[in-house]
Image: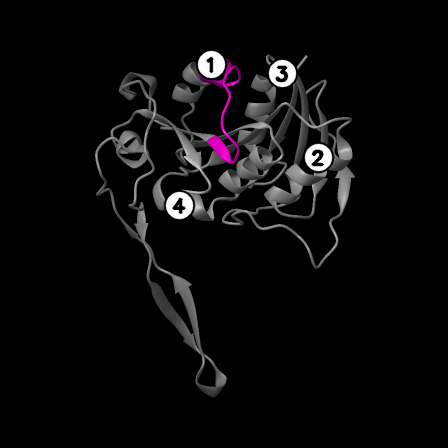
Amino acid sequence: MRSILIVNDDGIEAEGLLRLAALAKEFGEVWVVAPDGQRSAASHAISLHSHVDVYPHDFPIEGVRAFSCSGTPADCVRVGAVSLMPSKPDIVLSGINNGYNVATDIQYSGTAGAAFEGAFHGCLSIAISEEAKSCHEVADRYLPEILAELVEQRLGYGQIFNVNIPACPLSECRGILRDRAVSHGMFYRDRYKKTADLPNGGMRLVVDGQYNEDCEPDTDFSAVVGKYISIGIVNNYN
């Protein structure tokens, strides 16, 4: 039986994590190691100069062994693969993230960072993200068959599958687009807005993103904008 490690960056109480764990039980023995709180945009960071606290977690899905971790999503993969599981997992699933991870956002994504960590351990690794809305009809319909397809695949070292799913009504989804290239664009063109003046000439800034849907054809970005599911292979060395 396959061993599957599930991680995320939204925290161990996140709804997407629960949905993914319930589905993954169809494909093997499931372990969960997830952050004890929100870790979005943690990228591939790991904890080197501080300790990591790990606790058993009372997970609501029968048969799933789960642990919370004070570290980053990538820490969760390392802790699970190296210390908690009896052997290295066959598959690492990261998600279901609350919000897309496409285009240049991938470089900041804790979801993608955890998947890359799994790839570096030699595990088939899949990052799964969903548009940040409450409708899950498309994921419920398509994700079981997508996982059934991808868990049988093999990737090169440092490569991950990146899956992004629109959260629209099923009737509006236009299907699946595979082999999507990573767009050079971004959903939000970030700038910074000053919110306060600080002593000694300082200033307090917050990100002020401007929404954008301009994107190249045949990319992950254009797929989700067009209400397609996007599946692509991302290489950390590109």
Q: At 56% across and 18% down in the image, what residue appears?
A: 23
Choose between 59 and 228: the one closer to the eye: 228
Mark before the other along the chain sequence, 1 or 2 = 2
Residue 153, placed above or below residue 164: above
User: Image quadrant of residue 10?
Assistant: top right
Q: Which residue is mark 3?
A: 25
Residue 205, placed above or below residue 170: below
Q: Point out the stretch of residues depicted in magenta.
A: 146-160
Mark 4: which secondary structure?
A: helix
Q: Which residue is mark 2?
A: 80
The reply to whether dot 3 and dot 1 touch (C-beta < 8 Å) is no
How packed mark 3 is, by other alpha carbons closer than 10 Å (few <14, some 14-19, many 20 or more), is: some
Q: Amino acid at mark 3?
A: Lys
Quadrant location, the C terminus: top left
Check residue 149 in the rendering and tell me which mark sits there, or answer none: 1
Mark 2: which secondary structure?
A: helix
* Label 4 to label 3: alpha-carbon separation: 29 Å
Q: At 43% across and 85% down in the image, what residue appears?
A: 201
Mark 1: which secondary structure?
A: helix
In this view, the mark in front (4 or 3): 4
Residue 35 shows up from this direction: no
Residue 196 percent coordinates (x, y): 42, 75
Check residue 105 in the rendering and tell me which mark sits there, or answer none: 4
Mark before the other along the chain sequence, 2 or 4 = 2
